[in-house]
Amino acid sequence: MTATLAPPVRIGRAAVGALGMLALATGALESVVTPTLPLLQRELDMSPSEGALLSIVLLITGALVTPVAGKLGDRYGGKRILIRLMAVVCAGGLVSALAPNLPVLLLGQVLQGAMVGALPLSFILVRKHLPAGESKVAIGVVSGLFVGGGMAGTLSAGPVAEGLSRHWMFALPTIAVIGSTALVNRLMPHDPPGRSDDAGIDWPGLLLLSGTLVTLMLVLALAPDVASQPLVLGALILLLAAFAGGWIAVERRATSPMVDLSMLARPAVWKSCVLTFVICVGTSVAVYLVPQLFAVPSDEYGFGASATAIGFFLLPGAVAASLAGPISGIGARRYGSRAVVTAGVVLMVTALIALAAVHTEIWHLVIGKVMIALANGLCVTALVTGTATSVEQGDTGIATSLVLVTRVLGYAVGAQVSGALLTAATPSGSDVPAESAFVTGFAIAAAVTALSLLVTRTMSKGAKD
């Protein structure tokens, strides 16, 4: 009892460094698919729709794991849950590294999705073991290293896949994750578990939300083949409605719901969720289509870029995304969150329209991707911060989890719609979709994103200093 009630042990720089190394390794592992997606599609004979599914399945798993990991961390201790989550991530990395085909690779990505819940657990540990001022610095270090890991993965995935094999681009960061997890286990002291939550985990809600998301992805993936499989698509739509209806009913009655739907009645929350969804749809269209356009053969209308070259072309966008958070924070303090979100939406719409109209040079795509990454970071950071500060302190986790779920849904829908457009526009016997599919994708994304301006007009201006 005395051990449980004793204050947490103060940690030193070595323990914070171990958490930072873990963030660096997981960031690298998370980012290897995007620059190498065209290569993976060729080697595993994937359609564009299947490639879109591969690009977002990790995020879907993360959206499901994160709220459960937070509750388990509060109940049993953050370190204990973090180490177990990372064991699942390491298993997923090894499965992805050894995968001989798409189904096994998808399984590996599903297991790797547990890493999304690891970063918040790292923040919980830092806050438990350090004073407030030092914990802010440590959280900034860990967050920065995670972004840095993403940049490293984006740059290195192509050269590793082409110089060694696609198996090694998963294996090398997985080895780094295994080593850094062992360091965290050795250097980070155990944190005392919190008080038990008698309501427990909302397992029915978790299962029904999983079914809803997976079925939605299948519906979007099969949409281009509706003429040949109308009955299958119709059955999936009915199943989707059943899953969604069941999930809503369960969440409304649950004592401790995974996602508190009553929170959506608050204007600040539902507006943030709608805006996050729409903005992430626009972002994910570019995230998926730009690498595909780089990879289109140069004798067609593309650039025939290798996986290595694609990684270099995407790097400026990754840098812009890493800078967007601080810029958004400064802008929100000075001008208010509504002004930041409005500026971000206008920037993204402009970039998407420009990409639809002009994409004949590599720099067109690079600049467009930079603008979209910056706009997304500005908007999402301002929306998450605004949501967190618009509710009571005890409701922060619930409100931000709603934004997280809608963020993942936006990415998933945008990627799957983009994949469906390319699949539908690919002639029989060819691997190259019609150029019009890219134009249509960028234009649709611009139109959808522009609709969010109707919501931003009704937002609160947000706090200004």
Image (cartoon, helix red, strand yellow):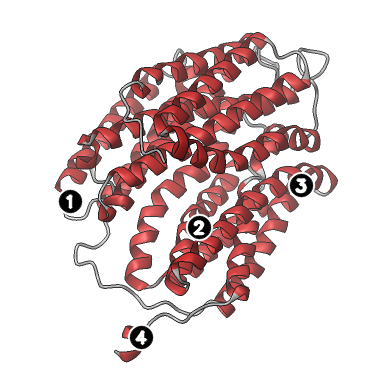
**Mark number, residue 13:** none
Of callouts 2 and 3, the N-terminal one? 2
User: Where in the figure is residue 168, as x and y percent of width and height?
Assistant: 75, 53
Of callouts 1 and 2, the N-terminal one? 2
Q: Determine which residue is flagged by label 2.
A: 119
**Mark number, residue 254:** 1
**Label 4, label 1: how many angstroms apart (C-alpha)?**
34 Å
Of callouts 2 and 4, the N-terminal one? 4
Secondary structure at numbered mark 4: loop
Mark whose residue sits in front, 4 or 3: 4
Of callouts 4 and 3, the N-terminal one? 4
Q: Determine which residue is flagged by label 3.
A: 156
**Label 3, label 1: how many angstroms apart (C-alpha)?**
45 Å
Please name whichever residue, 409 or 102, is drawn nearer the observer in this view of the structure. 409
**Mark number, residue 6:** 4
**Label 1, label 2: how many angstroms apart (C-alpha)?**
27 Å
Q: Residue at x 42, y 80 (%)?
A: 8
